[in-house]
Amino acid sequence: MRLATFAAQADPHHPRVGVEVHGRVLDIAKGMRVGSDTPSLAFRSLKDLLAHGRPALDAVRALAQAAA
């Protein structure tokens, strides 16, 4: 699993956290909101994501697999 920090063209001053899926970067916060009734995982940075440990990484891995 490859994680990335990126900025959207529409909002270049606010970095986002993403995961690579088939050569493209999926915004984790937006991906978690799609089809979910639970609050999304919104991480301020890659460091923040890693600080949440294995449960957060498992959720991101599941998101990437579902998007593949």
Image (cartoon, helix red, strand yellow):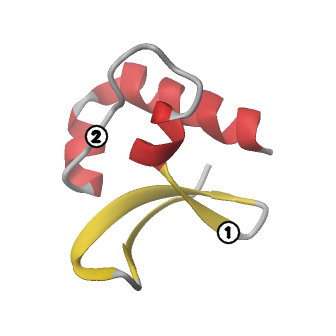
Tell me which corner region of the image, top left, top right, bottom left or bottom right, holds residue 45: bottom left
Q: Is 28 above or below relative to 40?
A: below
The percent coordinates of residue 7 (x first, y second) are 35, 77
Residue 66 left/right relative to 20:
right
Q: Residue at x 40, y 19 (%)?
A: 55
Relative to 56, 43 lies left or right:
left
Q: Residue at x 36, y 29 (%)?
A: 40
Which quadrant of the rendered structure holds the C terminus?
top right
Question: Observer-nearest residue: 36 or 60?
Answer: 36
Locate residue 41: give its quadrant: top left
SS assignment at label 1: strand
In the current view of this chain or complex, which residue is farthest to the top? 37
Q: Quadrant of residue 23?
A: bottom right
Give the mark nearer the N terminus: 1 vs 2: 1
Taking the spot 25% from the left edge, 44% from the top edge, the residue there is: 43
Gap between marks 1 and 2, in whole Å? 19 Å
Q: Which residue is mark 2?
A: 42
The one nearer the camera, 2 or 10, is 10
**Structural crowding at the residue carrying mark 2, measured as other residues with C-alpha within 10 Å and reported as few (<14), some (14–19) or many (≥20):** some
Residue 13's tag is none
Residue 4 position, x and y percent, is 45, 65
Name which residue type carries label 2.
Ala
Residue type at tag 1? Arg
SS under mark 2? loop
What's the mark number on residue 24? 1
Taking the image as shown, residue 13 lies to the left or right of residue 1, namely left
Give how far across and how far down residue 21 sits, in percent. 71, 56
Residue occupying the point 20% across, 45% down: 48
The foreground one among 55 and 29 is 29
Side of 42 where 5 appears, left or right = right
How many numbered callouts? 2
Q: Nearer the viewer, residue 30 or 20?
A: 30
